[in-house]
Amino acid sequence: MQFFQKPFTSGMVALAGAMVVMDVLKTKTYPMPVIRQNESVLAAVRQMLAWKETGLLIVTPQEEVVGIITEKDIMRLVAERYTQLDKIEVWEVMSKGLKTIEHSANIEQALELMTSEHIHHLPVTKEGKTVGLISLDNIVWMRLRMKEDEARALKDFITHY
């Protein structure tokens, strides 16, 4: 199995309607972010930060994929094993220089900002005040519901026409 440690030289990405999973992979700097199974969690964190990834595939010395480590796994580890968390104030580790988006912006604008800035959570503002927080997961979930509703409406139209 070949692991890509440098960017793909991708050609044209398919139109959104005909997009396949490989089209998404072709847009990634590191389409297959991996770490050897004997590396430390700290090494994984540093690699995720350097590569702006939220997860890494774990491989054996024979390059067999045996698992995955994600930011949620690391958060769980920190909460379970790190006993000094009650002594560290959140401002010491928070992200600074927040990017925000106006409540009336369309989803495409939010996605563009989130992907260009490599952020997964985006505060939403209205008239200069923060009114909420959206995540990439929220957007994906909403888009799936919209597609399902659209498909149901088309099916209803066709069967009742």
Image: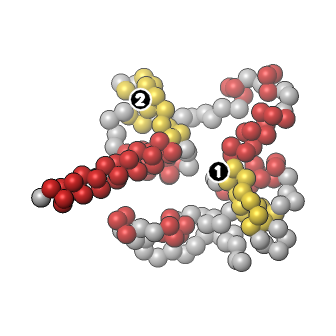
Relative horizontal placement of residue 122, taking residue 34 as reference (left or right): left
Q: Residue at 45% of width from left, 46% of height from top? A: 141
For residue 119, which numbered disc appears in the image? none
Of the residues tagged 1 and 2, which is closer to the observer? 1
Residue 39 x/y as whole percent: 85, 57
Q: Residue at 12% of width from left, 58% of height from top? A: 161
Q: Nearer the viewer, residue 8 or 139?
A: 139
Q: Nearer the viewer, residue 23 or 156?
A: 156
Residue at the far front in the pictured view: 159
Q: Which residue is mark 1?
A: 54
Instruction: Identify whether 5 is placed above or below 98.
Output: below
The three-letter code of the residue at mark 2 reads Thr
Q: Residue at 40% of width from left, 44% of height from top? A: 142
Residue 88 occupies which quadrant of the picture?
Answer: top right
Instruction: Identify whether 83 is placed above or below 57.
Output: above
Quadrant containing the N terminus in the rendered view: bottom right
Residue 118 x/y as whole percent: 56, 49
- How busy is the neighbourhood of tag 2: few (under 14 within 10 Å), some, or many (20 plus)? some
Tell me if residue 50 can be seen.
no
Q: Which residue is mark 2?
A: 125
Tell me if residue 144 can be seen.
yes
Instruction: Identify whether 131 is placed above or below 80.
Output: above
